[in-house]
Amino acid sequence: MTAQDLQSRKLLFSPAPHVHSGASISGVVLTFMVALVPALVFGIMTYGMHAVRVVSVAIASAMAAEWILQKLFRQPVTVHDGSAALVGLVLAMLLPPSVPWWLVALGSFVSILVGKQVFGGLGGSPFNPALIGWAAIRLSWYEHINFDFSMVQYDVPFPIDYPLSVLKWSGAEALTQFHAMDLFLGKQIGGLGTTAILLLLIGGLYLLIRGVITWHIPVSFLGGVALTALLFWWTDSAKYADPVFHLLTGSVMFGAFFLATDYSSSPANSLAMVLFGLGCGFFTVLFRVWSVYPDGVVFAVLIMNILNPLLDKIRPKVPGKEEREAA
């Protein structure tokens, strides 16, 4: 037997997955960006050049941060794959259009450094990178991310009050100014890319059709929000909002399709994904009801990111394993 024959018969070991789908990083990133375009256009049409400024600074600073850090750490430069640009875009869509440029740039830098490069780059982060940057500036510069304070300067054809703040401080009885259809069509203040519920739903369905995400996390996320909100609403409908209101406000729809489905920080198995989504929905409502924050989507996803390694231990049964062990 020749050396070439021996080489061909070697048993190769490698971590999962063992079958390549054929998709590329840049292809997946482009698909996510295309899915976000309708909601992004809506935000730009609503807030004008302020929204363009936030998005441009976020994307440019995220790409620049990745290039600089990879050069500094002597790693291969991968800014061309678009993943850093996607991090910047997701971060921008969570922000109000009034955020100062330097804060946007700082959030993008933190997203890339702490949320991505510290853990080895793309695919290694246990957290959604954009959420790390958002949390950093949200906790440090609260007044710039507070929708009630930052949005009063805009002349928009819908209530200038943040729906979740009204619920938080005045109870469900004060929500008469908000109508479900208006909320569904994006007639509410919030993150510049998170308010157009209909367009986000269309973008999410596009991701499902293209096969870059599965239904497990989005559906269970929305189901977790609805079920948890229903329990509170049943206990006191004057104080707590109904499930429809919770589904149509804040970053729920954006979180279900574009935040919780981040590949590196979410489970890979079906049952684990369902539990992950349910947990995101459950904690979202708990934060809205019991914390000082009107919306809890980002914090809920980060909590479930922490629990992801435990959930990922839930694996499907191997056919014939029990029979072999019994034998």
Image (cartoon, rainbow, N blue to C red):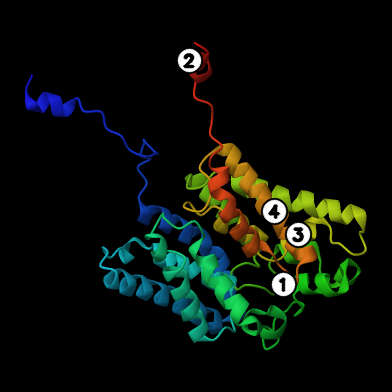
Upstream in sequence: badge 4 or badge 2: 4
At horizontal 45% and vertical 79% (from top left) the residue drawn is 57
Q: Amino acid at mark 3?
A: Leu
Label 2: which residue? Answer: 324
The answer to whether residue 310 is left or right of residue 71 is: right
Residues at marks 4 and 1, CA–CA distance in whole angstroms: 21 Å
Label 1: which residue? Answer: 188
Foreground: disc 3 or disc 1: 3
Label 1 crowd bin: few (<14), some (14–19), many (20+), radius 10 Å: many
Label 3 crowd bin: few (<14), some (14–19), many (20+), radius 10 Å: some
Secondary structure of the residue carrying numbered label 3: helix
At horizontal 45% and vertical 55% (from top left) the residue drawn is 31
On screen, residue 124 above or below 51: above
> Can residue 91 be seen by looking at this rendering?
yes
Label 2 crowd bin: few (<14), some (14–19), many (20+), radius 10 Å: few
At horizontal 33% and vertical 72% (from top left) the residue drawn is 69
